[in-house]
Image (cartoon, coloured by chain):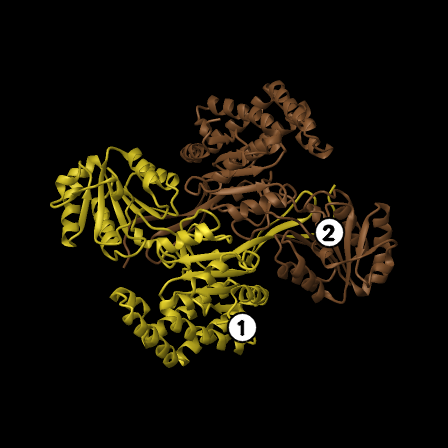
Chain colours: A yellow, B brown
């Protein structure tokens, strides 16, 4: 194949200027056209998807992988609906904040602008192709989408729908690039194109993300893992604590905002842990308990150092009794992945101190870690969750795909 | 020397938690103590500075370099005054923005927090040691300062003043590390410590910055160069245009916010360029002119492709006549370094379009590029100017050394 990623990125950079200058109305029309093209081309998308599924079965991919890969008319409809929802959100571009007059007489403010060209590197879910394209367009960016080889036929079929919509609006087709060549060498070259690409967002396993972080010359938004802690304080409302434990651990185990470690203040251990044990037993949860809590759980294993670091992504939890609030803070500071931590307490000072002192991306008092999600936090659609502290921290919506420039309005002023 | 940068960074990470939890009052007291220690230890700082100056003379460093390196009681006083000024600024940490109640009942907001550990890599100006330390402390961060070997004795003497102040407040001395070993190997190792260090800010020549960007695993704030453009529109007020040209090109040539390229609309070339030529001739400015403007300047050279990219940092300018507003925009988009661009025009629509469409870090209408500076834009002290679009874009004050976390206040809510 004669595809050149360097050339595609350079063209995307040029196209990005055009996307940046679209009005909100034009961008929303483009998004609506993409959604319509998805529905109109459902049949050809499904034909392409079958090719991917056949190849996946031949390569003995597991059932979970096949499920992530599979499309049907209903899933395509829901992908299209998500695009329409993004079209309906407020435009993050062009807002001007906080214009102030300086002593020199000039007026200074900040205007929100697109980043330019964003590259997504992701694995086998074809819906990411459309979600990411839609969010990048909403924020006025061009986008380069490099999905996994397992989904390549589906991704290219989805790309055609985007092309149709871009053509309908007479826009540069280079604004959305679906990389047709999934060879690793293309990805490696992509990571060196810091003159054309402004940001890389890898989505997938920890291995992929570490690889991109260590090898990219372009800034990377990273999200390694979510080791979310629930701390049940001595002043906790027990009912809230049990509900939040149940929701956080058992509602969905394979997601990054599920609970992995339960910390319990020693003053309430004797009353709370038997109830927690009964609840977790209902779900056949594997327990890794510290020596002060192990007797409350039947069949529990002794927690090791690895358990405090573990993101189980399964019906499995680490449990530790802590002597006081300070030791709970200390444990979280030591083992936090920077994702989401929760305190359950009715004590005003302790909830305030927890929120102030724990510097994970999302810190909660008396609410389920499962709320740590762009939609639930009011950002609209989410392009990822950042556990790097720079640029974006926590769930990222369209605004995280923009930056701010300074604007100065003078009337001939010069500097003394 | 048995200095280990990995160990120092790990200790700084621990100390960062302590700095993050200081109140504004405590941080300002620490800054005041640093300023006092600087004045009290003026003599020993000057003794150390003489060692650096002697070594610099032996190594035949040029006069400009010696001047940047040299301290005297007055300069030390002004460094101390800058620290007091930073103490007087508003605390960027702890502000909570925009708390909203979600449909689920949880209240969601964002709280500004420190980044953690910031590493500065810089060249020979010892004042950076104190400026950077003060701004990082103000923003609640620990800081690792790796200055050039030319200033090492001065930097270590300044570090002692910081140590005295930290000890007086009974704070962890690891919160501010002045790297005693200026060997390149130490810097190379520093750039791999992404588990301990959150951000690197290199300050110095383009070579240093590129080296850090290409080799760091830690996010880097970069600022390569400032190729600032002045576009004099057909609707320009000629007096404003001449004042802004004079201020931007001639007030200080060695700084990144000085003008490097003058673009003139063809309709006003015949009236404006003779006056511009007379003004620039007064300052013996070297002119690189396009073929349509060269006749207005005596002794001008023909501008080449390199001139449009050049950051002269000297009494030297590139001049180009453009046929219309669109071509001015196009030229700037093509050659901009992303720093600062200025339009001079009385036309409402064109000034608005220029401000909206040019996505450099600072975009101005009818004001001098020399205002592109943290102090002039109202940020207080400046730690650098970012021409990367991520995290920070443009002049960076203390707020650019922080990030925001999500905070959630619930009352027992769980997710449906």
Extreme residue in the left direction = A298
SS state under label 1: helix
Q: How many C-alpha atoms fall within 10 Å of the one at disc 1: few (<14), some, or many (≥20)?
A: some
Residue A39 seen in this snapshot:
yes
Residue A85 visible in the shown view: no
Pick the residue in front: A169 or A199. A199
- Compute the Cα span from label 1 to label 2: 35 Å
A284 or A92, which is in the foreground? A284
Residue at 72% across, 33% down? B62
* Quarter location, residue B150: top right
In the rendering, at what x and y percent does residue A356 appear? 39, 40
Label 2, residues with CA under 10 Å away: few <14, some 14-19, many ≥20: many
User: On the rendered image, what quadrant is the C terminus of chain B found in?
Assistant: bottom left
* In the image, residue A40 above or below residue A406: below
Residue identifier under label 1: A173
The image shows a total of numbered marks equal to 2
Residue A416 horizontal/vertical position (percent): 74, 41
Q: What kind of element bears circle 2?
A: strand
Residue carrying label 2: B260
């Amino acid at each position: 194949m004669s595809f050149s990623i360097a050339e595609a990125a350079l063209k995307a950079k040029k196209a990005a200027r055009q996307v940046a200058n679209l009005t909100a109305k034009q961008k929303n029309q483009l998004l609506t056209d993409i959604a319509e093209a998805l529905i109109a081309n459902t049949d050809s998308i499904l034909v392409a998807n079958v090719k991917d599924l056949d190849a996946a079965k031949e390569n003995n991919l597991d059932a979970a992988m096949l499920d992530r890969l599979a499309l049907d008319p209903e899933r395509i409809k829901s992908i299209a609906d998500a695009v329409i929802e993004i079209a309906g959100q407020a435009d993050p571009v062009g807002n001007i904040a906080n214009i102030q007059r300086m002593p020199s007489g000039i007026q200074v403010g900040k205007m929100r602008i697109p980043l330019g060209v964003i590259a997504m590197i992701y694995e086998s879910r074809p819906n990411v192709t459309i979600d990411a394209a839609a969010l990048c367009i909403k924020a006025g960016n061009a986008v380069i989408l490099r999905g996994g080889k397992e989904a390549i036929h589906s991704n290219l079929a989805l790309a055609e729908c985007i092309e149709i919509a871009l053509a309908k609006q007479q826009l540069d087709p280079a604004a959305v690039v679906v990389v047709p060549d999934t060879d690793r060498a293309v990805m490696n070259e992509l990571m060196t194109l810091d003159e054309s690409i402004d940001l890389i967002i890898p989505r997938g396993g920890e291995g992929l993300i570490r690889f991109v972080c260590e090898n990219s010359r372009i800034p990377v938004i990273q999200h390694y893992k979510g080791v979310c802690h629930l701390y049940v304080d001595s002043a906790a409302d027990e009912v809230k604590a049990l509900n939040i434990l149940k929701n956080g651990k058992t509602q969905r185990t394979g997601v990054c905002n599920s609970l992995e470690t339960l910390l319990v203040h020693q003053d309430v251990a004797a009353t709370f842990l038997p109830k927690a044990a009964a609840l977790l037993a209902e779900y056949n949860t594997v327990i890794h308990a510290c020596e002060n809590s192990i007797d409350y759980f039947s069949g529990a294993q002794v927690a090791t150092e690895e358990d405090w670091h573990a993101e189980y992504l399964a019906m499995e939890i680490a449990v530790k009794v802590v002597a006081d609030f300070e030791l709970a803070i200390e444990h979280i500071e030591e083992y936090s992945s920077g994702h989401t931590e929760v305190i359950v307490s009715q004590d005003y000072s302790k909830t305030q101190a927890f929120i102030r002192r724990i510097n994970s991306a999302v810190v909660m008092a008396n609410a389920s870690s499962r709320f740590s999600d762009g939609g639930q936090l009011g950002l609209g659609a989410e392009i990822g969750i950042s556990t790097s502290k720079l640029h974006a921290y926590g769930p990222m919506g369209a605004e995280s795909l923009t930056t701010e420039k300074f604007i100065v309005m003078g009337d001939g002023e010069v500097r003394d």
